[in-house]
Image: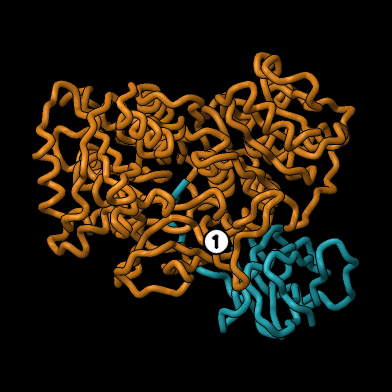
Chain colours: A cyan, B orange
């Protein structure tokens, strides 16, 4: 369990996936990739059994939970899929704004 | 981080330049890595740029961030003394500049130089690129000296977290098609020039650069490079409109241009209306933002332009002169002089809040309120649907007989007159009223107009205390090179004029 602060970077313990937190709730969250806890980017991975049943992560895509309290952005793709507190995170539909600059 | 993602996602796309001969995202990434190494070993505190825009801009910008050093773009048109004064504040520094610029700088300053070519030179295999980049969101990414239209330039601080929040909040990764290209004609020392460099790279959109704006060259580049989007300041758009009109009925227009965004100052209504007519297939976006807010905080999109343009409802139609609604990650509030929130349709100071908002100046106290609001010093109001109308800098407000009068509304009325090319309403000291309203008017070529007629047009549309006390005809108004009206300079001119001395 850890506090997801906006701008915080997290790395998968079981694949290449890295994410940056866009939005996090006030309570601590168990953020996982491939079913195993993610770790603060740069720290040592933790051990666990890699669940590779999902679609993995895609570079530049945003992932959210059902309540829309968590949003992370994939900065490095990998084979593991993201989860929070045991529930899978979903790919967020992009609604691009018109380019302003 | 943004560049690393782009290099991983679409490294082979051309990032800057022509489709053949331009630099790819991967090349920018590699060059930036070498530049970072160079900047680190120079043992400096800042990476400056005193140069026109070029492919070396993104290399220098990302190289500085990679090395954890602030990127400080300076206006190359400043006088030697002004440049030295700013460099004094940021040295020791390394600066991207050409040899002729280096000659202008005092050699007592600790400023090392690197040229455009040196940053894009083929990589020396001896230099080992360190992937150990700095990832601290608190690092200063950009120091940007504000244009100093009122006194000593202040250095706005934008940290990595502000810029990353802006990009993540307003751009989708790789959302641009491979055929898209953006034309950047604002200089690197303007926040829009920096924001455009970052957001287009992140979107995967090729960038075409025009170093020194010229309407003919701009139109030529849109056509030859099949440019699909561009950002311009109001003076640029009015010159582009004039240029297209001068091409006559046989003008081929700008068929590839899908989107044109404008901002950085008040757009005269006749200019935008002519532009909408001349470019029926182009989507117009009006963006409002400040250096201190990491560029755009509100925008009026293409649909809203069309809706306002074709509406018969005056409350919808007037939105053409609004800056639209706040970005999803931004809150806007209108406050009175005591900081109390005002209801819709009431004018006050525009306050903004959001992760991208910095409100910080180097060496000065943070200007954010305790709960994170940034008072912009811009005056404005929100309509019932949340559309934001900007009336101008609060410091420009004319105080006549105890009444606050915004110059913007007077200028808008006068600009509707077909003979008037440009106008500024200025408060000039007056014994009786404290300030009197002087309208400085530039007429279109070979046009004449009666003073009384102009005063009457204001009297008909606005409250009577808005009527200009004096009308002064000038050949031109003073602007800085990014199209910002220098009201302080104009005010001095008008005050001197009143003394009977020459302008």
- Left or right of A68 on screen, residue B342: left
Quadrant containing the C terminus of chain B is top left
**Mark 1, chain letter?**
B
Mark 1 element type: helix
On the question of residue B321 being in view, the answer is yes
Q: Position of residue B160 (x, y in %)?
A: 69, 53
Query: Observer-nearest residue: B61 or B259?
Result: B61
Specify the quadrant of the image occupied by residue B67.
Answer: top right
Nearer to me, B173 or B157: B157
Which of the 4 image quadrants contains residue B100? top right
Q: Residues within 10 Å of mark 1 (few under 14, many from 20)?
A: some
Residue drawn at (43%, 26%) of the image: B213
Q: Position of residue B398 (x, y in %)?
A: 34, 51
Looking at the rendering, which quadrant does residue B26 occupy? top right
Outermost residue toward the front in this view: B431
- Residue A24 on image: x %, y %: 66, 76
Q: Quick one: B395 or A52, which is closer to the camera? A: B395
Residue B162 versus residue B252 in the image, above or below: below
Count of marks overlaid on the render? 1
Question: Residue, x 62% and y 28% (percent of image)?
Answer: B82
Can you give x and y, in whole percent of width and height, for residue B412 in the image? Answer: 24, 47
Q: Which residue is mark 1?
A: B169
**Residue at figure coordinates x 27%, y 27% from the top left:** B474
- B359 sits left or right of B284 in the view: right
Residue in the picture at 32% in, 48% down: B435
């Amino acid at each position: 369990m850890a506090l997801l602060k906006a701008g915080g970077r997290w790395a998968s313990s079981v694949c290449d996936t890295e994410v940056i937190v866009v939005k996090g709730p006030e309570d601590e969250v168990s953020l996982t990739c491939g079913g195993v806890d993610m770790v603060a980017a740069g720290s040592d991975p933790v051990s666990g059994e890699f669940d590779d049943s999902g679609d993995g992560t895609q570079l530049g895509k945003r992932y959210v939970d059902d309540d829309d309290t968590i949003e992370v952005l994939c900065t490095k793709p990998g084979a593991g899929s993201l989860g929070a507190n045991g529930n899978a995170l979903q790919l967020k539909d992009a609604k691009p704004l018109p380019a302003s600059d | 981080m943004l560049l690393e993602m782009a290099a991983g996602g679409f490294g082979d796309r051309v990032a800057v330049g022509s489709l053949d001969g331009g630099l790819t995202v991967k090349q920018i990434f590699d060059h930036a890595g070498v530049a970072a190494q160079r900047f680190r070993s120079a043992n400096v505190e800042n990476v400056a740029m005193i140069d026109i825009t070029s492919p070396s801009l993104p290399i220098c910008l990302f190289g500085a961030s990679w090395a954890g050093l602030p990127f400080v773009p300076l206006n190359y048109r400043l006088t030697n003394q002004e440049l030295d004064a700013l460099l004094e504040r940021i040295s020791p520094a390394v600066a991207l500049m050409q040899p002729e610029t280096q000659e202008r700088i005092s050699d007592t300053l600790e400023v090392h130089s690197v040229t455009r070519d040196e940053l894009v030179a083929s990589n020396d295999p001896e230099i080992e690129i360190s992937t150990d980049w700095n990832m601290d969101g608190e690092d200063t990414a950009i120091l940007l000296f504000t244009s100093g239209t009122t006194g000593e330039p202040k250095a706005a601080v934008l940290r990595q977290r502000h810029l990353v929040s802006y990009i993540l909040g307003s751009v989708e990764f790789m959302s641009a098609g491979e055929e898209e290209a953006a034309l950047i004609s604002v200089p690197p020392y303007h926040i829009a020039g920096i924001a455009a460099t970052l957001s287009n790279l992140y979107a995967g959109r090729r960038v075409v650069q025009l170093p020194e704006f010229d309407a003919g060259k701009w139109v030529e580049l849109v056509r030859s490079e099949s440019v699909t989007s561009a950002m311009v300041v109001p003076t640029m758009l009015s010159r582009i409109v004039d240029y297209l009109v001068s091409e006559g009925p046989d003008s081929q227009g700008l068929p590839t241009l899908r989107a044109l965004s404008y901002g950085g100052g008040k757009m005269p209504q006749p200019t935008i209306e002519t532009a909408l007519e001349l470019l029926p297939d182009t989507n117009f976006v009006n963006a409002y933002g400040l250096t201190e807010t990491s560029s755009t905080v509100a925008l009026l999109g293409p649909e809203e332009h069309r809706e306002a343009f074709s509406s018969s409802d005056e409350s919808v139609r007037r939105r053409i002169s609004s800056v639209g609604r706040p970005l999803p990650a931004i809150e806007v509030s209108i406050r009175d002089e005591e900081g109390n929130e005002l209801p819709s349709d009431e004018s006050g100071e525009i306050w903004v809040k959001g992760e991208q908002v910095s409100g910080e100046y180097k060496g000065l106290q943070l200007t954010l309120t305790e709960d994170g609001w940034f008072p912009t010093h811009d005056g404005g109001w929100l309509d019932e649907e949340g559309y934001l109308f900007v009336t101008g800098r609060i410091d420009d407000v004319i105080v006549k007989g105890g009444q606050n009068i915004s110059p913007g509304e007077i200028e808008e009325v006068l600009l509707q007159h077909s003979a008037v090319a440009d106008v500024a309403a200025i408060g000039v000291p007056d014994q009786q009223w404290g300030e009197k309203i002087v309208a400085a008017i530039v007429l279109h070529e070979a046009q004449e107009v009666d003073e009384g007629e102009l005063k009457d047009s204001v009297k008909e549309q606005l409250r009577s205390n808005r009527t200009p006390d004096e009308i002064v005809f000038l050949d031109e108004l003073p602007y800085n090179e990014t199209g910002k009206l220098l009201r302080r300079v104009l005010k001095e001119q008008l005050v001197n004029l009143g003394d009977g001395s020459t302008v």
